[in-house]
Image (spheres, helix red, strand yellow):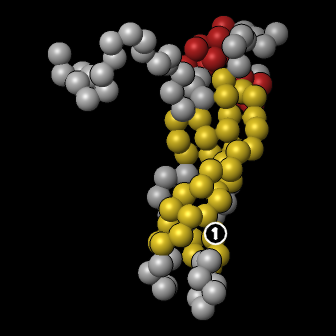
Amino acid sequence: MDERNFYSERQDTKELKLVCPHCKQENSYPIRWMVRTKKASLPRGAGDEDRKRFANARSYMVRVDEMVACRNIRCRKRFELTGQSVVLVSDAPIPQGDFDPDTFGNR
C-alpha cells in the first residue's frame, strides 16, 4: 500500500520573517507548505506490514516554496530558502488543568 493512503493532504500558507542576504532587510514572506495529516483509521485492504507502517506514521509538513523574491523595491532579488524543509506536527493533546509551560519537564 502506498504511503499517501495514510495521510490527508492540504496546502497551507504561513508567514515567515526572513532576511534578504543581498540587502539585509527583514520582511515577512508567505511560504506555502503541504500539510500531511495522519488519518484517524487505517485504510481498507491493509496487511500486517502496512499496519506497522501506519502505527509509526506521524503528521508532518513539507515546504513547497524553494525561492522567495525580496520585497525591498530597490533589491527585488530572489533568494533560496535554506534550512528545514520538513516539520513534524505534534499529535499529542494539549495538557489541561494546572499546566505551566515554564516548569514543564522540571519535576
- The percent coordinates of residue 64 (x first, y second) are 68, 54
Q: Residue at x 63, y 87 (%)?
A: 73
- The percent coordinates of residue 12 (x first, y second) are 70, 45
Quadrant of the image occupied by residue 2: top right
Q: In the orientation shown, which residue stands out farthest toward the bottom?
A: 74
Q: In the orientation shown, which residue stands out farthest toward the front?
A: 98
Q: Is residue 69 above or below residue 9?
A: below
Mark 1, secondary structure of its residue? strand
Q: Is residue 92 above or below residue 76?
A: above
Quadrant of the image occupied by residue 76: bottom right
- The percent coordinates of residue 26 (x first, y second) are 48, 72
Q: How many marks?
A: 1
Q: Residue at x 59, y 23 (%)?
A: 57
Crowd band around label 1 with a 10 angstrom C-alpha radius: few (<14), some (14–19), many (20+): few
Q: Residue at x 30, y 22 (%)?
A: 100
- Name the side, left or right, on which 84 lies relative to 8: left
Q: In the orientation shown, which residue stands out farthest toward the left?
A: 107
For the C terminus, the quadrant is top left
- The three-letter code of the residue at mark 1 reads Met
Q: Is residue 49 visible?
A: no
Q: Is residue 71 visible?
A: yes
- The percent coordinates of residue 43 (x first, y second) are 78, 13
Q: Judge by depth and name the residue closer to the eye, 98 or 7.
A: 98
For the N terminus, the quadrant is top right
Q: Is residue 67 above or below residue 83?
A: below
Q: Judge by depth and name the residue closer to the eye, 39 or 94.
A: 94
- Name the side, left or right, on which 60 lies relative to 13: left
**Which residue bears the numbered disc 1?**
67
Q: Is residue 80 above or below residue 57?
A: below
Q: Residue at x 63, y 17 (%)?
A: 54
